[in-house]
Amino acid sequence: MAFLELDDVRKEFGDLVAVDDVSLSIEEGQFVTIVGPSGCGKSTILRSITGLETPTSGEIRLEGNDITDLPPYRRNIGLVFQDYALFPHKTVFENVAFGLKMRGASDEEQRERVEEMLRMVNLEGYEEKYPKECSGGEQQRIAVARAIAFDPDLVLMDEPLSNLDKNLRTSIRSELRRIQDETGVTTVYVTHNQNEALSLGDKLAVMNDGRLEQYEEPETVYREPQTRFVADFLGRSTELPGTFRRRNGDAIAELDGGVELVVGNDESLAEGDDVALFLRDEKLKLVDGTAPTANVIDGTIESVDYRGRDVNYYIHVPELDQTLQVSHIADNSTETFHELGDRVSMYVEPENVTCLPASTGRS
Amino acid sequence: MATEQDHVTKGETDVDAERGYFGITFASRTKWNLIRLVTVVVYVLMLLPLLVIVVNSFNPSRLGNFPPESLSLRWYTELFADELMLRALWNSLQVGVAAAFGAGLIGTLTAMGFVRKNFRMQDALVIVLLSPLLVPPIIVGVAATIFFSQIGIGRSLMWLIVMHTLLGLPYAFLIIRSQLYLFDETLEEAAQTLGADRVTTFREVTLPLISPSIITAMVIVFVISFGEFTATQFWVKRTTTTVPVVIFSMLRTSISPKIDALATVMLVVTIAIPLAVLGIRRYAMPN
Amino acid sequence: MSTERARLPAMKDRVMENDWVQFLISPGIGIAWVLGLLFLPMTIILVISFAIPGDFGNVIYEFTTANYERFVNAGVYQSIILESLMYGVVVTLIALPAGYTVGYFLGRSKTDWKWVLLGLVVLQYWVPFIIRTYAWIIVLSNNGVLNTLLMDVGVIAQPLDVMYSNVSMILGLTVSLLPFMILPVYVSVSTIEEDQIHAAKTLGATDFRAFREITLPQSLPGIVSGILFVFIISAGAFLAPTLLGGPTTRMIAPIIEGVFINDFNWPFAAALSMIYFAIIAFLLYLFTRRVDLEEALETGAT
């Protein structure tokens, strides 16, 4: 029995299915990230776990107890809101102490715990300030402290970093991870940002259109996407349609214009299946004429996007009638860059080609 | 009242803000000066008569020649020796405060109902709620008088309170509702996830945050109640009379500077009480 | 996730049910208050307007259309209502340009005095009508402040006979109602960014064109709200015609009061009230075909 279990949870708003029979289980102490585009249902899942939303059908169990119909104030679950939802008329102390006060903690207990929490988020001495006197990053940490202060069974975070600027996001991201390590509190983190999704969690759930697409360790999800949506959503890649062939024990994808690519062997595919290939732009390597003979695609540079630490080449492949993107770490001291119109060759290792049945998930 | 600098960026009347004072054409300045002139005239018309009342109330002469040759508190002394006047003042204050609380409470519950719940015919019901603003007060006065007399309820302060609550309700509702529209409901959700049930959530989060609008609404209702005459004239008897009714009946008999004194007291109450309440509100709730 | 937030109302109904606070938090009490104390009394006077007047305010409940026939046959009441509406139009026509100008000034001016000036309008709005009306008596009457001053200075030999006339009534009424025009116009104008006007000018608009194309359309809600309040209040005014008006001033509210209090003829007073109310309601209906009544009331009342 897992710590938190979602069992065929479904939520409909009128005709719209926001969450489409999602099952998910989370172990105690885990940090799980749910990622997906806007409107994919991830926030609805979060709100269902807190009780701010009641599923149309399905069951949510915490430590084996059915909590599906419990109002939020009878669950012991902390939620960090996207816009923090700090009480503007209460001081930082009163905000962080609110959950403790609701649970009848004494003044002394409140003071101790709030102090401990503020120390943990590096905001000692902020007790008497009001939220509006704090910066966005500080407010964010106060919200985290408030959600953890009353020692919840579970902490949920709803896009908590989306209102912060980029630099702050990175630093608070690592701080969140540190706080979770320190407290060991089971955490579910919802985001639409794939960097956060990949770097934060012990496990990563990818959602699309109300459905759970894949739920595994972040590395696995990135390396071995199970559906076309996941392959397309995480990282940057180009999707190519093709047909699956087996030849001399090799798994081969036949693309338009006679191009063939050897792909990682996948037992589930059969001769003649329609497949979708995904070529990640960082897995495509520019090679010169002496390179391997297989898995090489030729093309012409269509445009160059110099971005400092890397260079993006957009390479048109006439056979495929497609433009592929190649991301190339720039060695600024020595390298001479290709120019528009240069003919180049690209190579991709078979195991780096994601090959999925065309029928799995849409992208 | 307006300084020369306010020409610099004057909307239509300026040609180009960047060019500042010297870029303004003669025609633009003339137009703006005309606007200022009209404004000054309007302010004089609005304020000067009131000023005359206040000054006159300190004029010991019964004829009220203006400007007064000397100042005295004669009329105030007479005013505060007059039991009817004091009673009217006390009645007006009681009714105003009670109506303010009544309309504040009902307005809050009603506005929350409209903003937070879905029900049918919402638009039509809003117009129903606002209709006391649309029915001329003379008709409200006549209708309520006939209604109460037909069901056998005699004139009392409670009658006034109930009716002034009605007259103030649309204002209270609109003021509180406009604040509720701005209220971030995730704050209530946050309180609930932290363990506050709905009553606690309302007490700890919702009420403190919408209370500025409730206080404003109550002040406005008090002001409306305190000054209401046209409908109220039908609703009072001698012991429940209010200040406006007393002033009106004094005007019918004879014009005495005592009226100026009573009007000045009324002026002070209608201006001082709201300012005091709003001032305390600002002081007590820095946010 | 804006798409999911937008659907919250569906959720709210569920979360809030089964709770005593939720029972209280409903439009019910306010609606009941208005229905019980306004709609019900209005219905009763509608009934009584078809009854026979007895002595001393008594009502004999026998169906008659006599009260309405009296209105139709004695043309005087018709012309009184017509005149009331006309006074309403005149007051509105004076208050609109004057109030708009002041509201515009307050909305555009950068003077430090702006908040004081604005506060004075709000205070004026708070001052009871009876005081605002009474003030004109002591200013305008024959031995009033204006005449005394003018005669002292020697501008005039005889007192100006302006008091107790249509002029004094219209003046008093208009000035009393100016805040209802100034405040909503100020609110509308002050929300128009000045850069819009600058932009219009860079695109070649003259001062007047910029005003007509940019400021005027966007301040329309304020104008509409001002017109609504000024017209309804002035056409139904009681104090100004009673205290400031002259022998030829006839308006409906004092007439209804007279029939009700002096003649003790409740059914006829009820009939006059219903007729006048029907006319106002019809005008409001015409009004709502062009604009949103709720919005106009909200602009004016908050």
Image: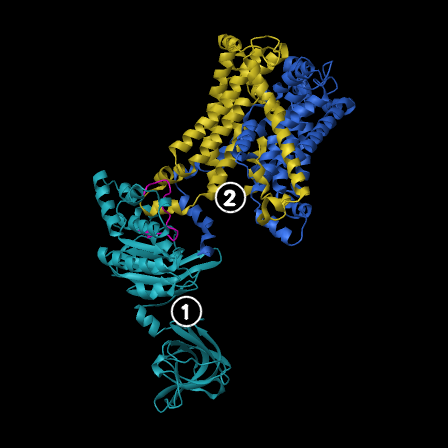
Chain colours: A cyan, B yellow, C blue
Cβ atoms under marks 1 and 2 closer than 8 Å: no
Rendered location of residue A83, percent (x, y)? 39, 51
Which amino acid does the dot numbered 1 rest on? Phe
Rendered location of residue C255, percent (x, y)? 69, 20
Asked if labels 1 and 2 share a chain, the reply is no
Q: Residues within 10 Å of mark 1 (few under 14, many from 20)?
A: many
In the image, what residue occupies the spot 39% across and 77% down? A328
C145 relative to A330 in the view: left or right: right
Q: Which residue is mark 2?
A: B119
Q: Is residue C232 magenta?
A: no
In the image, what residue occupies the spot 36% across and 83% down? A350
Which amino acid does the dot numbered 2 rest on? Phe
**Which residues make up the magenta segment?**
A78-91
User: Does A79 appear above or below A254?
Assistant: above
Quarter of the image where the C terminus of chain A is located:
bottom left
Q: Which residue is mark 1?
A: A233
